[in-house]
Image (cartoon, rainbow, N blue to C red):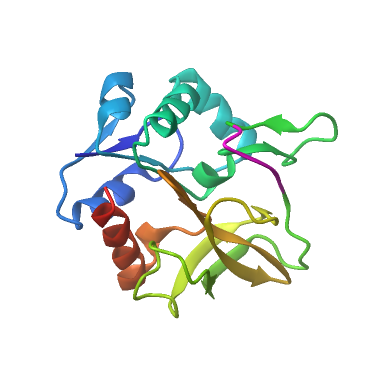
Amino acid sequence: MIAILDYGSGNLRSAQRAFERSGKEVVVTSDREIALNAQGLVVPGVGAFAACMRGLVAVGGDAIVRERLAKQRPTLGICVGMQILFRDGDEHTNGPLHQGVGIWQESITKLDAPILPHMGWNTVEVSSNSNLFKGIEDQSFYFVHSYAAKKPVGIAQAWSTHNEKFLAAVEDGAIAATQFHPEKSGDAGLALIKNWVGML
């Protein structure tokens, strides 16, 4: 069973439909035990970093993610659900950075581009050791964001460019994340979801 974490952020129904197409049972839940013990956990995210992080903490999602990682249970972050897995982010702040879950010790910062958000289809440059992108290394994926990680973390990475290079995906043992929306990325997104489900 795959649990999609409901913490008040993210297009939960489109994510649910996309992951159901992998053939797995999918539930949308904020229940700690279900989220903790599911075969796979998806952390979606739409909106601003700080608001998503507040929602995540409110349902204990930050602790769930850390505990799943400690127990090597697969977790996938999507869009802002990827960003909040990092140490901190500078979206809408002139003072201290917003704190994230801290799985990866780098910051999320604004893209240096004349047109934001970065919205639409873009290609990715994938590490040769990627499992998430097997068979879809040359495909395009759908992005909607103005902030991103810009330094490598994890075991395998995918990169994309919108005026500057940024991290499009990370694979790091039991935890993985995509800056793009696989659930909105057509056949390539479904193939990526199936690749992730195949690793559960």
Magenta-span inclusion, residue 85: no
Q: Position of residue 57 (x, y in %)?
A: 52, 22
Task: Say which quarter of the image contains residue 77.
Answer: top left
Q: Is residue 184 above or below residue 161?
A: above
Query: In the orientation shown, which residue stands out farthest toward the right?
Result: 94
Q: Position of residue 41 (x, y in %)?
A: 33, 38
The answer to whether 153 appears left or right of 36 in the picture is right
- At 72% from the left edge and 67% from the top edge, which residue is drawn? 115
- At 49% from the left edge and 19% from the top edge, which residue is drawn? 58
The answer to whether 169 appears left or right of 198 in the picture is right
Query: In the orientation shown, which residue stands out farthest toward the bottom?
Result: 138
- At 73% from the left edge and 72% from the top edge, which residue is drawn? 163
The answer to whether 82 appears left or right of 24 in the picture is right
Q: Main secondary structure of the magenta part?
A: strand
Screen quadrant of the N terminus: top left
- At 39% from the left edge and 60% from the top edge, which residue is drawn? 182
Q: Which residues are magenta?
A: 102-108
